[in-house]
Image (cartoon, helix red, strand yellow):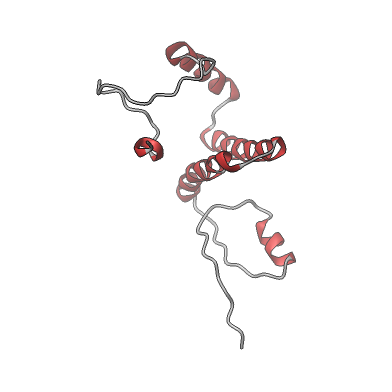
Amino acid sequence: MARIKKIYYNKLVRDKIPQIIGKSGGTAEFKKLNLKEFQKELFLKVGEEASALPFVKTKSEIISELADIFAVTDEIMKLKKIKTSDIKNAMKANFVKKGGFEKRLFLVWSQDTGYRTNERRNSKRK
């Protein structure tokens, strides 16, 4: 008997993935998440989807990856009952407080003033 090669993903996937795997002749194991697990995995999924952006090459790939990010953020908004107007208002407030990206500024270093960015992965990048 041939042994099945398994790849463990342990991640949130879209609703049609079971059918896609089945149509390709594969088998898989899925579990339904409770609300708390689902929320945690959605937040992780945003990072997963966003992490693909630095590696895309074409405009259509960028659009596809942004669409995936928007799909996940839309689901989070539904789950947390956040309106689009809430996001737009927060964007305006963040712009007033921190500005935009028109100047293309890249922070190399800063004296430690207690300010902390919410970015964690690239803090050691040189």
Picture quadrant of residue 118? top left
State the residue at coordinates (69%, 55%).
16
Q: Between 99 and 68, which is closer to the camera in this rendering? A: 99
Would residue 97 appear left or right of 78 to someone viewing this image? left
State the residue at coordinates (71%, 60%).
20
Q: Residue 125, image x and y in percent?
A: 38, 37
Is 73 above or below relative to 93?
below
Would residue 113 appear left or right of 118 to someone viewing this image? left
Q: Residue 98, image x and y in percent?
A: 43, 15
Q: Between 113 and 92, which is closer to the camera in this rendering? A: 113
Quadrant holding the C terminus: top left
Is 98 above or below relative to 117?
above
Picture quadrant of residue 84? top right
Total number of numbered discs in the rendering: 0
Q: Residue 92, image x and y in percent?
A: 52, 14
Is 91 above or below relative to 76?
above
> Residue extending furthest bottom?
1
Picture quadrant of residue 7? bottom right
Q: Between 9 and 62, which is closer to the camera in this rendering? A: 62
